[in-house]
Image (cartoon, rainbow, N blue to C red):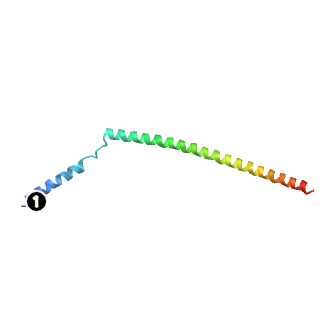
Amino acid sequence: MKACAAACLLVLLSPLAQAEQRPPAAPAPATTAAAHARLEALQGQVKSEDAQVRQLKAKVDTLESNTQAARRALEERDRKIAELQRQLEAKQGH
């Protein structure tokens, strides 16, 4: 009976022992090449999107600069109009 139990135990443990001795399977070359290709594609996409972000930031900076210049010009025009109105009122008052 003990011999049978020992034999059964050896049979059950044999696949476990073999599994421990096997080196980990290396990725298949096709899988590695596909992963590398995907990585390169993603890196290219990141570079492209980075370039787009830089372009958009430059456009925003230009728009902000133009907005500030337009605001200053409008304020200057409003000051001139106010000064001309004061001069007109002063002449009409005399």
| Viewer-side residue, 43 vs 89 | 89
Q: Are there few (<14), some (14-19), or many (20+) residues within 10 Å of tag 1?
A: few
Q: Which residue lies at the image location 64% right of the left edge and 46% below the top edge?
A: 63
Tag 1's secondary structure? Answer: helix
Pinpoint residue 39: horizontal percent, then vertical percent. Answer: 41, 42
| Residue at the extreme right of the image, as rendered | 94
Q: Quadrant of residue 93?
A: bottom right
Residue found at the far left of this picture: 1
Q: Residue at x 10, y 59 (%)?
A: 5
Among all residues in the image, which is located at the extreme front? 92
- Residue ID at (67%, 48%): 67
Per the image, the residue denoted by label 1 is 5
Q: Is residue 64 left or right of residue 21?
A: right
Residue for point 30% across, 40% down: 28
Q: Nearer the viewer, residue 4 or 33?
A: 33
Reply above or below: 12 against 51.
below
- The quarter of the picture where the C terminus appears is bottom right
Q: Could you tell whether 27 is left or right of 47 in the image?
A: left
Point out residue 64 in the picture as x, y percentages from the top left corner: 65, 48
Q: Position of residue 69 (x, y in %)?
A: 71, 47
